[in-house]
Image (tube, rainbow, N blue to C red):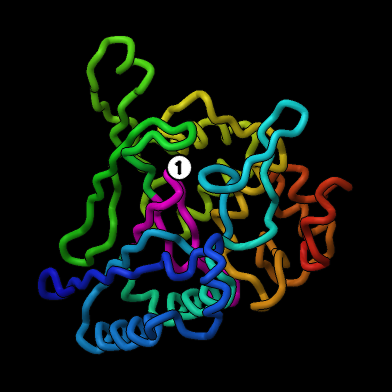
Amino acid sequence: MLVEPGLRVIALNTNFYDAWDPYAHLLRSRDAPGGQFAWLNETLANATRDGEQVYIAAPVAPGIPSTSGRTPQKKKKGKRHSRLLEDLDVVDCFNDRFNELVQEYYPIIAGQFYGHWHRDEFKVFRDDDGNPINVAWLTSSVTPYEWVNPSVRAYSFDDASKNITDYRVYVMNLTQANLVGRMSWEFEYSPLSAYRNFTDMSPASWLALANNYLANPKNFPFYYNFHTAGCPLDTCTSKDCMLQMYCAAVRLLLFVCSLVCSFVLFMTPPLSDRDRRAQVPGVLPFLRQPDRSCRRIFSSAFLL
């Protein structure tokens, strides 16, 4: 829909691709059910021709799931436990095709907006060389589903470029609301005001944020508090949990459609393992040198 000259909003039904739906796997192809990707390709090509910027809105985001939301939780020695990097939240071939379209048309995609997970998250799209090119923002939900406080988000954008310049999140503390018998919505945070050395909403800034917060055990709790809208009931303290959160934010694409979990977390020129590890001293030690319990997660493509 063309909402004003120069700005088009594209709404996709990504429920078609939900990997949790067994019927989605019966429809595996290079195009989506109903020819949605062919239509998306044509719409983006026309928007490029007409000099339009585009916002994409959809329920299910591409990429792998984080540890929260709808990820299966199993009890193990009294703690919540989730799968690790074993599959995508979107059927793999659909996921790969959508990433290809983003790589082709990212100059005109001014924003991607998703829900579905009930969590505050982001995902960084990259080109074939590993450079950050686009960002998807996942907003948490008004419904208090699985250890989250209700929240809403308001985006700010530049009227000329249509690029997102910031957003503000407002939360309702359920514990406090039940104590006093009424709801109260309060400002929680905005990225530009909350995160240290975060100066803009560019893909490069979000990738740097992932490295500085999601891959840093000292800063991770600060990020995770926003992830659940301040709900103290959901925690992420194990290295497996933090690893999943980090990979969900920075790695969306499987190298081959039929292969699962061949991840290179940092796409850099070929270096020795020692030199490569020396370039990322702030990264969690288990990301640089996975122990035996994590070995099943990574293929030989894990080079850190």
Q: Who's the residue at 28% across and 34% down the image?
A: 170
Question: For the image shown, how many numbered marks are present on the structure?
Answer: 1
- Answer with left or right where residue 191 lies relative to residue 206: left
In front of the other: 226 or 179: 179
- Answer with left or right where residue 82 lies relative to residue 16: right
Please state the horizontal and vertical placement of residue 262, each as a whole percent of the image: 73, 67
Asked if residue 28 is positioned above or below residue 159 in the image, the reply reads below
Q: Who's the residue at 84% across and 64% down the image?
A: 272
Note whether residue 131 is visible. Answer: no
In front of the other: 36 or 154: 36
- Answer with left or right where residue 52 lies relative to residue 174: left
State the quadrant of the N terminus: bottom left
In the picture as drawn, the residue positioned furthest to the top comes out as 180
The residue that mark 1 highlights is 197
In the picture as drawn, the residue positioned furthest to the left comes out as 4
Please state the horizontal and vertical placement of residue 205, each as a whole percent of the image: 46, 54
Asked if residue 183 is positioned above or below residue 166 in the image, the reply reads above
Please state the horizontal and vertical placement of residue 168, each as a whole percent of the image: 28, 40
Characterize the magenta stretch by its predominant secondary structure.
strand
Q: Which residues are magenta?
A: 111-138
